[in-house]
Amino acid sequence: MIISDQIGRTVHVPALPQRIVSLVPSITELLIDLELTKRLVGRTKFCVHPKHSVKKIAKVGGTKQVSLEKVAALQPDLIIANQEENDEGQIKALMTHFPVWVSQIPTFAAGLEMIQSVGQLTQTVEKANNIIERSSDAWQKLYDAKRSIKTAYLIWQKPYMTIGNDTYIHDVLRQLGFVNVFSETTRYPTFTLSDLQQRQPHLILLSSEPFPFKQQHLDDLQSVFPSTSIRLVDGEAFSWYGTRFLKTAGYLQELTNSTLTNSTKE
């Protein structure tokens, strides 16, 4: 089978891959939800969902520190990677020996396209289309173009880091009607609290990953931004895709509703 990946490469893949290695946590979860656990022979140590299923799958290192030797020993007939989450040099090295399909997910729409492609790659098109349809319905209910909540989404401390306009998280914020106050930037820029004050966010979201923000961090920021609503949020809900679309729609809706309620009270 010849198929294009999400960075425009043509990939030659067996008609029915039997030994799949996933180097992307979100896609590992998707593959398992597509009932492909028996064909999934390798994963990264960060592929932790669903817990009861991943335990059976061999680890091949981290997303950016893959053991090429361990992958080779598994003799995969399909490797699924991600342009952002994996190391480019390692992925290119794997491409010389194995079929590697690379995903690129800057938007919710690209996430749906990924699900469709994975369905084609693994001959699970019907199940994949069902996930796409249900995800589209669930996320359509989240979208409201009338909302305009100036929001800062923090992913790191020391230095503080946020998200630019070419990231998946930015698109999730857009879906919810949250306006990224760093929308003129790209990738993951650093910033100072003085810079953030000048942007006057109405809402600051502190992610649980990659930096694990806690209540103490919230309290510290609240002292600097006394009139701003600050929330601790589940980072996976904002950065994981695939079947996670279905699992987080309710959480995101509740977050949006509570944020709007608090804004109204203020």
Image (cartoon, grey):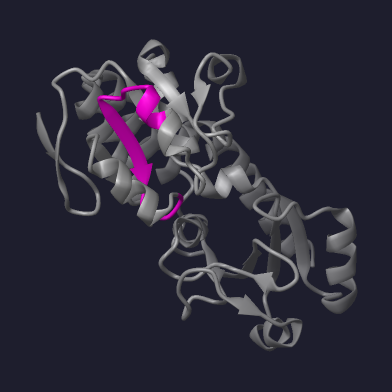
x%, y% of residue 148?
54, 69
> Viewer-proximal residue, 240 or 181?
240
Residue at the farthest top position: 38
Examine the rendering and report whether any part of residue 148 can be seen.
no
* Residue lying at 64% horizontally and 70% vertically, measured from the top left: 161
* Residue lying at 75% horizontally and 57% vertically, measured from the top left: 231
Q: For the C terminus, which image quadrant? A: bottom right
- The quarter holding residue 84 reads bottom left
* Residue lying at 22% horizontally and 28% vertically, measured from the top left: 121
Residue at the farthest left position: 2
x%, y% of residue 59?
53, 27
x%, y% of residue 113?
27, 42
In the rendered image of this protein, does residue 40 appear above or below residue 242?
Answer: above
In the rendered image of this protein, does residue 140 appear above or below residue 132?
Answer: below
The stretch drawn in magenta includes residue 84: yes
* Residue lying at 40% horizontally and 30% vertically, measured from the top left: 71
Instruction: From the viewer's perspective, tell me whether residue 73 is left or right of residue 15.
Output: right
In the rendered image of this protein, does residue 172 appear above or below residue 10?
Answer: below
Q: How many marks?
A: 0
The stretch drawn in magenta includes residue 96: no
The range drawn in magenta is 71-85
x%, y% of residue 2?
9, 35
> Viewer-proximal residue, 71 or 164?
71
Instruction: From the viewer's perspective, tell me whether residue 155 is left or right of residue 231.
Output: left
Examine the rendering and report whether any part of residue 65 can be seen.
yes
> Viewer-proximal residue, 221 or 15?
15
Q: For the N terminus, which image quadrant? A: top left
- The quarter holding residue 229 reads bottom right
Instruction: From the viewer's perspective, tell me whether residue 188 is left or right of residue 260.
Output: left
